[in-house]
Image (spheres, helix red, strand yellow):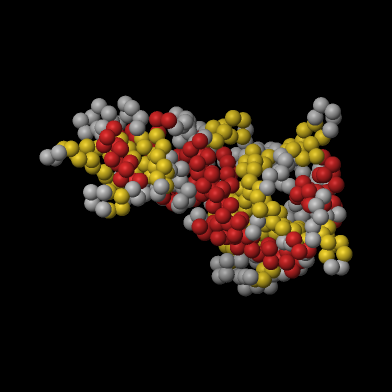
Amino acid sequence: MTVFSYFSRCFIRRTVVFPKSIDVCLSQHLLQHSGLIALTSPGIFSLSPVFIRVLDKLVNLVKTKMATLGAQQMLLPTVGNSNLWTTSGRWNNIEQLFRVKDRNGKYYCLQPTYEEEVTSLLTAWEVSYKDLPILLYQVSNKYRDELRPKHGLLRCREFMMKDLYSFDADLTDALETYKNVCDSYADLLSTLGLPYYKVCADAGHIGGQLSHEFHIPLPIGEDLLYICNKCGTGVNAEYKGLSCYLSGHIFADQSNILHPTDTECSHNFTEVRGVEVGHCFLLGQRYSKCFNATFDSPKGKKLFEMGCFGLGLTRLLAASIEHFSAASFPDLSADEITEIRWPPGISPFTGAVALQKESAKDALSPSDLKLIMDAFNGPDHNTSRCRLVPGDILIDDRKGLSLGRKLIDLKRLGIPWIVIAKVRFTFSFMTSLAVVV
């Protein structure tokens, strides 16, 4: 079924024109220029209804991937008790943690990750080995006290993230879960049509035995990656240790230091700049030990083998805009590009219909518009031809604007195809449709 929306009823902010002196990346330029996001304070943005349409489509795609893994959605509290973070040893070790104090003098934080919260939750449940594996995920806003937020949604203080936490009986099963989630992330990025690199990375303050990042190669990327031209093996330049990584087989021993010019392999590494959009961690018993999170096994109580997996959704959309918009206009500089390009299948609207200006001789009447909408939504009974166009169609019905002005605005939103609708004069009035994008 086709669902119609009307531009005259859409809440879209008027176009913002950037002075030449303001240094913003392509995605921030396009999103703010089109009125899809608005800066409220450094690193914090309001997201418009049109942007939310795209975000919802991405979230639904992610949920489908999670369901395939057998993961279940939940929602954990944004505000985390300082006692949990002190127990894990991370309360004083994370500079980017937003800390707050209530009127009773108790400390909390706006949680950037949820290893403490979800592990603590599992300790209160009676879990049997027969219940494993358990995969729990959420889609929610996260917070990070960035010292210097920049590049719009690529590095901000409030962002939307999908975070998944896995609980397995032993290391072998945990590794299998780890591999399955990594494969799911790779499949998601391929579905979106994005180039990506999966690279070995340091576990950082989250900890664990194994860690991989997913990067979109972009010139503005803050991470330096070494990618092998032969097999695609990759590593983050900040990674502290690596002995071996082969396709489909992960070695837990990571004690050696990898130097691209001094390695036992014959790999030919190339430097690439990347934007991290996903991160996978094999946590082992890092948090289950802290909170004594156990399950009942035939041999008694055993600690969970855990994993955690993050996917930055708002960052992924911004990185997608960086890639697709630049690729669509290779001859233009970043400040000359005015049209957003989204990943296939998640644009805010499937398509659009631009109506001729109401004062023009060839403007449509309400009955003509209804005929067009019926043609999109079902069969033509006069010709027995099905014209079904599933999806969500935006009808640009704004008054007093020329077709040219409407086309400019619709193209800026990144709508994949646009149809011009007006009356053509022949022996009788006929509706003419012309695809222009």
Q: Residue at the location (51% across, 39% down)?
A: 51
Q: Residue at the location (71% across, 44% down)?
A: 76
Q: Residue at the location (29% across, 37% down)?
A: 369
Quarter occupied by residue 214: bottom right
Residue 256 vs 410, above or below: the answer is below
In the image, residue 341 lies at what x, y percent? 44, 46
Which residue is nearer to you in this view: 169 or 327?
169
Residue at the left extreme?
Answer: 427
Left or right: 289 in relation to 70: right
Q: Is residue 224 visible?
A: no
Which residue is nearer to you in this view: 37 or 126?
126
In the image, residue 300 lies at what x, y percent? 87, 64
Quarter occupied by residue 261: bottom right
Left or right: 127 in relation to 370: right
Which residue is nearer to you in this view: 375 or 253?
375
Which residue is nearer to you in this view: 322 or 349?
349
Residue at the front extreme?
Answer: 381
Quarter occupied by residue 158: top right
In the image, residue 154 lies at what x, y percent? 58, 44
Q: Residue at the location (83% across, 61% down)?
A: 296
